Amino acid sequence: MSNARQRLSQVQSHLASSEVDIPRGRESILQKSPDDVVVTCALRTPLTRGGKGGFKDTAAADLLVHTLKSLISRSRIDPNLVEDISVGNVLAPGAGATEFRAAALVAGFPETTALKSLNRQCSSGLQACVDIANAVRCGMIDIGVGAGVESMSLNYGPDAVSEFSETLNKHEEAKNCKVPMGVLSEQMASDRRITREVQDAFAARSFQKAEAAQKAGKFEEEIVPMKVKWVDPKTDEEKAILVDKDDGIRQGMTAEGLKKLKPAFKEGGSIHAGNASQVSDGAAAVLLMKRSTAERLGQRIVGKFVCSSVVGVKPLLMGIGPWKAIPVALEKAGIGKEEVEVWEINEAFASQCVWCVKELGLDESKVNPNGGAIAFGHPLGCTGARQVSTLFNELGRTGKKVGVTSMCVGTGMGMAAVWVKE
């Protein structure tokens, strides 16, 4: 046998024997490799009520400055080593590209640190993190930041969506992309027979879990307090205040109390202000790099990014996005739903979250154990990055390992990601 054939035979033998030894499922994703994409810091601002809360007078760029400064301070990363920052945003003109680049410079990153902004609707913050993770994984960069920010107080309104052209309006499915999410969610709740009683019960539990978590100090580790200028709406007096907690969490909320609220989108409907996500302001950021890089720099590893998925669904069925995205992410990770210990699924509306949890057959006790967007808000571009810090803190407190973040996405999409706590 020639040397070439001998070598080929050796390689084939090696591959055949090693395939049996490749770990599968949970065992595989819990293993550590120098090439793992890891998170070494994940944090967020408090989330505050749009138009009323602590950040109502604070620009999105200023929220981002504080969040990025806090990330540098807490992680002790040398900002000169960070090569790229990706920021999710939905409502700012141009997704905030110009002011967010300026914000990074103010925060202490050098001009050599690149930045982009992106808009994938409600999954923008997660997409920003995933873009950085994939850039690290493929070797495009060594260190990056995925972030998300939104000032719904200052940018929310009809101007956030441009008018459709005649070409778009002539296409029936395309035209559905501009149907307001509250309207289509009301229709979905009716079509899928998700009663108001079920929605209100779910929403009340979200408030109750968030209230208990806040009282127990469970959010304190992930939150970076921020001093801001705030104008008192009663006196027009400008004050300096410290925002150090989520201010949208209502105390003592019950399903009976929610029954008193009027439907918001349809007379006799089931969706109202108490069982839908709150209009909110906030920012979050996640520092990512390879394990080998983190170990070389002495960075404390919080956890690792495993994989993600993004899918499309019918625009009028936007709310089912997690139902379709989560199985794809689990398949990529090689794990089953029973191996996931904590689920952070965005509560855009109780109707769609209840339906997704039920259809996926998830253990509801593992879903949003500290409440969700119904209780403390959904700053659109921020949520996907915010979920990462909330997930890792919960996994760490409870000694668990595997978690999933997911959300539905406006215009008919869904996204999910699998994470492992160290």
Image (tube, rainbow, N blue to C red):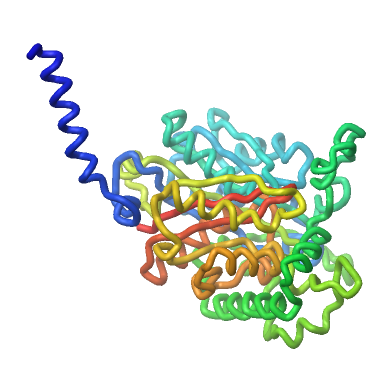
Determine whether 389 is above or below 331 in the image.
below
At a point 84% along the width and 42% down the height, the residue shown is: 172
Q: Is residue 338 left or right of residue 23?
A: right
Residue situated in front as seen by the camera: 257 or 96 = 257
Q: Which quadrant would residue 260 be assigned to in this image?
A: bottom right
Q: Does any portion of residue 378 appear in the rendered image?
A: yes
At a point 57% along the width and 80% down the height, the residue shown is: 212
Residue situated in front as seen by the camera: 170 or 135 = 170
Q: Which quadrant would residue 203 be assigned to in this image?
A: bottom right
Residue 137: percent from the left, percent from the top? 42, 36
Residue 199: percent from the left, percent from the top? 71, 75
At a point 49% along the width and 50% down the height, the residue shown is: 329
Q: Is residue 314 left or right of residue 141?
A: right
Residue 400: percent from the left, percent from the top? 38, 66
Quarter of the image that includes the C terminus = bottom left
Q: Does any portion of residue 62 appear in the rendered image?
A: no
In the displayed orientation, state which residue is furthest to the left: 1
Determine whether 53 is above or below 39 in the image.
below
Residue situated in front as seen by the camera: 54 or 251 = 251
